[in-house]
Amino acid sequence: MRSKFQSQDSLFTPLKILSKGEQDNIKSQLKNQFGIKDMPGILLMRGKERIFLFTGDFDEKEIKKLESKIIIERTGVYFGKQFDEGIRLSIEGSNLLKDQITKNIFNLDSKQAEDWIKGQDLNISVGKRGFLIMKYENDFLGCGKASEKKIGNFIPKSRRLRERR
């Protein structure tokens, strides 16, 4: 009989340090999407789409050696997710690279920013499709996904601004 820990271990996907070619592919996508020219650190993946950015002192060899001994749930900062249609940066990912982002920025007004951080989609047509960086004044609020009639919100429920009752 398996314990609940054994069944979780069998579902565990190892941390993958991306090859130079894979990192170059992501960097190219980020340049095309958002104008980002330089990535500090090492890119890693958990599963098929979750990207992490590690800027610490360990090199790739040391990370692999450590993971061979223990399960590493995360290394670095959750940076974003990779999809067929592009990369969706997390709030942290958009802030880490905010000085380089020059394309596909949607500037929110104060009402839109409040709705956004509450987790609401914006029912607005922006004339673009795909991932947009959401920005209010000097604050970067992650990515939304523009479609014909709205910008979809991806802020996790645990991070949304809640109404006082």
Image (cartoon, rainbow, N blue to C red):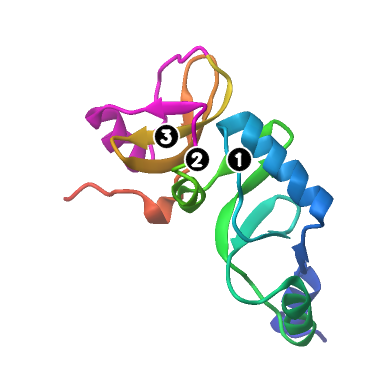
**Residue that label 3 marks:** 134
Q: Quadrant of the N terminus?
A: bottom right
* Position of 23 relative to 113 (above/below): below
Q: Tell me, for residue 69, which label it has, or none.
A: none
Quarter assignment of residue 74? bottom right
Drawn side of residue 121 relative to residue 148, left or right: left
Identify the amino acid type marked 2. Gln
What crowding class fits label 2: few (fewer than 14 Cα within 10 Å), some (14-19), or many (20 or more)?
some
Drawn side of residue 81 relative to residue 123, left or right: right
Name the N-terminal-most of marks 2 and 1.
1
**Residue that label 1 marks:** 37
Question: Which one is in front, 25 or 131?
Answer: 25
* Position of 3 relative to 95 (above/below): below
Q: Residue at x 66, y 54 (%)?
A: 50
- Closest to the camera, between mark 1 and mark 3, is 1
Q: Residue at x 46, y 15 (%)?
A: 126
The segment highlighted magenta reads 101-127
